[in-house]
Image (tube, rainbow, N blue to C red):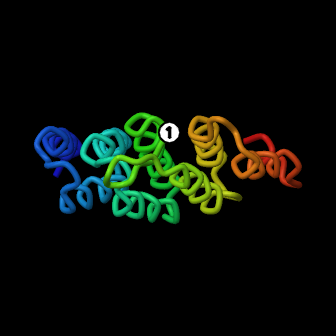
Amino acid sequence: ASAQVRRAAVAAMRRVAPLDDPGAVAALAARLEDSSAEVRSQAAEALADIISNGNMNALMMVSFRLQHAEPCVRLSGVDALHWMAVVRWGGKVCDAAGTIEESGVPMLVAAVCCSLEEDPSASVRRAAMLMICSVAKPATLETLLPICARLGHSDDAIRSS
């Protein structure tokens, strides 16, 4: 199918998928690996619209993409985590009862940091750091350490990201 058809499918799923539908979450997470940047971007945004706060299955599916061989897919994974954590959840992850789980945000930050600490792609490292800064408010030692560590890294490309 063409990129236009895949974009239309993502848009339709965004409109009609029931909240937290496992099939829709899996299908949209798979589109984070699409060959089209527009499809990947739409899928990242759509995921945030169809999941409830704290959907750990969706978090795991997206986090899995952070290990992908292609930088564009890892970047889409970071983008999806950003949409989920900041745009959808306002930087706070809640449990099923709606109680704010303070451990949720550091978990997201740690997942991105561990996966992308020395990513070969400067754009992926930069996106990860920007996502961490937008999620980790107020900043804590736990969230600042990975960023500070990059400032002293021996590789100029990592420091500059």
Query: Would residue 24 be found to the left or right of residue 159 on screen?
Result: left
Q: Taking 62 as reference, is 128 above or below it?
A: above
Q: In x, y percent, where is residue 21?
A: 18, 57
Q: Secondary structure at mark 1?
A: loop
Q: Amino acid at mark 1?
A: Gly
Extreme residue in the left direction: 16
Q: In x, y percent, where is residue 8?
A: 16, 40
Q: Which residue is mark 1?
A: 91
Nearer to us in this view, 94 or 154: 94
Query: Would residue 18 be found to the left or right of residue 137 on screen?
Result: left
Q: In x, y percent, where is residue 16?
A: 10, 43
Q: Residue at x 84, y 53 (%)?
A: 155
Q: In x, y percent, where is residue 56?
A: 38, 61
Quarter-wise, where is residue 5 in the image?
top left
Q: Residue at x 14, y 48 (%)?
A: 17
Quarter-wise, where is residue 7 in the image?
top left
Q: Residue at x 56, y 40 (%)?
A: 135
Nearer to us in this view, 46 or 9: 46
Query: Would residue 40 be found to the left or right of residue 111 on screen?
Result: left
- Mark 1 surroundings: few (<14), some (14-19) or many (≥20) residues within 10 A: many
Q: Residue at x 80, y 49 (%)?
A: 150
Q: Taking 38 as reference, is 22 above or below it?
A: below
